Image: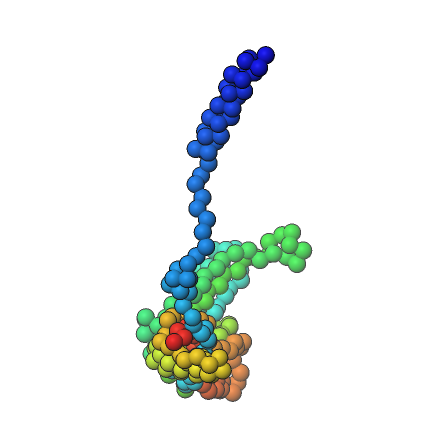
Amino acid sequence: MRALLLPVGIAITCSLVVAAAVTALNRPVVLVGSPSASTVNSTITPAILTSGDAIVSRKPDLAVVGAGIQSEQSTAAAAQSDLAGKAAKLVNRIKALGVADKDLNTNGYWVGPVYSPSGQSITGYRASEQLQVKWHNVDTVGKALDAIVQEGGATNLSVSFGLADPKSAQAEARSLAIADARSKAQAMASAAGVRLGQVIQVSDLSSNSRYPSVSYGAAQAVPTQVPVGQMDVQVTVEVDFAIV
C-alpha cells in the first residue's frame, strides 16, 4: 500500500506546482518599494503659494449703445414690413450722427406670434430688431440717446461703458497684483524663518472688469444726462515662489 501511495502523492504535488506556476505567469508583475530621499527631493519643491489683487481706475472712452425697435401687426409679413421701415429710419438717424459703418451692428432680430393671455390663440405677430452702436465720445452720449429715440424712433435703449483698448490698464493692474502677491509671500517667508526665492509659476485669475451700464425707456422732455465717472479694471493673480 505504501508503494502505491508514494507515486500518487508525487503526482499530486507535481500537479499543484505546475498549476501555481501557470497562475503566477498570468498575474501582472507589481513592484513595491519605498521612495528614496533623492526621489522625494527631486519631485517636491518647497514653495509659498500666494495670490495678489489690484484695481486700476480709468475714465471710459467708449460707450456701447443698444437701440431697439419693434412692430406688432395682424400678420407676420405685415409686422416685418413695418419693422423694416422703422429700422431704415433709425439706421439713417444713427449714421447722420457720424457713426461709421463698422461701429453699427445688428445685435438681434426676431419675428414671432403674440398669444392671448390664456395662451390658447394667436392675437397677432411681433417683429423686433436690436442694433448696437459704438459711440466714441462718451461725454456726448446723452445727446446721441435723445436723437436715437426722439428722431430715430427707438423704443428701448441701453448703454454701457468701457475702454477701446484695455490692455494698458490691464498690464498696469497685473504688475500691481504680482507686487501684492510678492509682498504677501515675503511676509509669510519671514514668519516661517525662510528666504523667498524665484518665481516658479504665475497664473492670471482675473474675471471681467466692471463696466457700468444703464438702461433707458422713452426719452424725457429734458436732455438726457449720462454721468460717465470711472470704471475699474481688476486683476487677480496666483504666484508660486520657491523657498531657498
The quarter of the rendered structure image containing the C terminus is bottom left
Identify which residue is drawn at 46% across, 83% down: 190
Image position, residue 95 (x, y; %): 35, 75
Q: 199 or 98, which lies in front?
A: 199
Q: How many marks?
A: 0
Q: 210 or 108, which lies in front?
A: 210
Q: Picture quarter containing residue 55?
A: bottom left
Residue farthest right in this picture: 118
Image position, residue 38 (x, y; %): 38, 62
Is residue 150 something that shows in the picture? no
Image position, residue 215 (x, y; %): 52, 76
Q: How is the image coloured?
A: rainbow
Identify which residue is drawn at 32% across, 74% down: 100
Q: Is residue 7 left or right of residue 138?
A: right
Q: Picture quarter containing residue 60?
A: bottom left
In the depicted structure, whether residue 63 falls above or below residue 11: below
In the depicted structure, whether residue 114 falls above or below residue 154: above
Is residue 230 something that shows in the picture? yes
Identify which residue is drawn at 51% across, 72% down: 155
Image position, residue 66 (x, y; %): 45, 72
Q: Picture quarter containing residue 137?
A: bottom left
Residue farthest front in this picture: 2
Q: 244 or 63, which lies in front?
A: 244
The quarter of the rendered structure image containing the N terminus is top right
In the depicted structure, whether residue 187 falls above or below residue 6: below
Identify which residue is drawn at 46% across, 26% down: 18
